[in-house]
Image (spheres, rainbow, N blue to C red):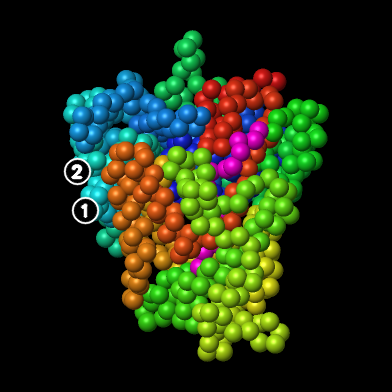
Amino acid sequence: MKISTIFTVTWHRWLGIILALVSAIALSACNPAQFQTQAADVPQVVFGILSDPKTFNYALSQESPNIFGLTYEGLVTENPLTGKIEPDLAKSWDISEDKLRIVFTLREGLKWSDGEPLTVDDVIFTYNDIYFNEEIPTDIRDVLRIGESRKLPTVKKLDDSRIEFTIPEPFAPFLGAANAPILPAHALQESVKKKNADGKPEFLSKWSVDTPPDQIIVNGPYKLENYTTSQRVIYRRNPYYWRKDEQGNQQPYIQRLIWQIVESTDTSLMQFRSGGLDSLGVSPEYFSLLKREEKRGNFTIYNGGSAYGTTFISFNLNKGSRKGKPLVNPVKSRWFNTLEFRQAVAYAIDRQRIINNIFRGLGELQNSPISVQAPYYLSPKEGLKVYEYNPDKARELLEAAGFKYNQKGELFDAAGNRVRFTLITNAGNKIREAMGAQIKQDLSKIGMQVDFTPIAWNTLTEKLSNTLDWECHLLGFTGGNEPNDGANIWSPDGGLHSFNQNVLPGQPPLEGREVTPWEQEIGQLYIQAARELDPVKRKAIYAKTQQISQEYLPFIYLVNPYSLSAVRDRIQGIQFSALGGAFWNIHDLKIVD
């Protein structure tokens, strides 16, 4: 699970979401239709993204937009239309009767983008030397840890075409977890073994965004052709990609993709309407305008219903310190760690007004960390706790917890400290900025002073991942059908356990960090659910995790927008879904001018 730069994945199956996502939040500083090169006459599609990629190294990536849905594939993939696991680099697999062993058989003739053979040895290297390497801080490990022991699968080579994965106990997400991208041993192995001056693998600085694109070796449908900071990312069809159609023609058919990098959704809309962009994630404020222009503009607006992923605010519950300095002001930390405080905030946010005013009615209330479409989702009708807008209830909770109001209606704690905190989000996203402004207004009605401060994405991720010095943020996580993909959020030591983040490898240690019993319980329930193979029993376990999450509110969930994308009619073969977006089957799409 990854942090979303809009609101709201993990591996190749998220290509469609990433592309829909980047179109939704991005645009073009200059008209891409005017961007010419010697190859400008080849079939190409132009998208927009809000911010630059942060790394070209998949194992070290934690956020979207990223390049990996276009450039890498794993052994299997998830079909966004059916939710079923399908072959990818592996053409088939056999699962043992006891469910503890899977043998994957690779396709014949697989190659990397530099023409080198993609072999079983690359699979072994990817898992054993990178994903399972404790010296490499990658979130994938959290998803693959099994049982109480948190052991990782054993991965070994059987012969030149087969790989065996073995686990110590039943693990329901076992097959789907094999969707992690396979990485090239011949390009990366030396950097994993070699240490830098600090004694760490050189791999940690391998394939940064400063790396020349032709050095990035991939196995997906596209490879990097060019990257210009703050301007664009250009992809070229991978000539060694394995897919071919029934007539033997090389796929994908679209030879070139361009991501324009800018920071204004208004400019994005302008460029789409003028023909400069081929797809646009339709924000609610633009929906009515674009709907009227569909026929004249030769595009179609696709609606996949509720989007996967989450939108939330979260308080920093970390009580830890670094070098004797608390991460969070102890006064504010006491507020944030008071359950009634968080519940009061949940009651005080008018989420329906957010839907009506900001999303123009194109969304639904969100109450769960698990996507509505997932088979493990617990609905309010089934017993999930919800926080309907009720500022009076919020004030009652605060006063019962010892907070007091002065004659002006301003809120103070029992020691006389004015309740004031900073809410941050990533700058440039008009929807988030509007949500943050309303949340500030809503909380002022229960006496809280909120300093709402949108900040640059790089600064935001630095606070969340490294310094941990934040108070409250408005963010989101990507989503999917498999709850265990969020194990790195709910494991107390997970890489995205952001509300009470433990340090990642190589970071300065924390003193005094505490893990609450309810945090431990959710983490244990995720372990239990992963080992339960009966879908009914598994859903019951995940139901309990959702109930605990809604009771203790590490994340205060807000709104689930509809998945809306506008795509030029010249792009044919679209099979839109909320899970995959418009471009999950990019290899099948064609341009007809």
Residue 257, position as x, y percentages in the image: 58, 33
Relative to 299, does residue 557 appear above or below in the rendering? below
Residue 92, position as x, y percentages in the image: 31, 23
Q: Is residue 90 left or right of residue 452?
A: left
Question: Image quadrant of residue 324?
Answer: bottom left
Identify the residue under disc 2: 168
Front in this rendered view, residue 471 or 163: 471
Which residues, given as a range, are shown in magenta?
A: 302-315
Q: Quadrant of the C terminus?
A: top right
Identify the residue under disc 1: 149
Q: Secondary structure at mark 2?
A: loop
Residue located at (70% from left, 30% from top): 300
- What type is the residue that disc 1 sits on? Ser
Mark-to-mark CA distance, 2 and 1:
9 Å
Q: Is residue 570 left or right of residue 215?
A: right
The question of residue 388 being in magenta is answered with no
The question of residue 303 being in magenta is answered with yes
Residue located at (26% from left, 60% from top): 199
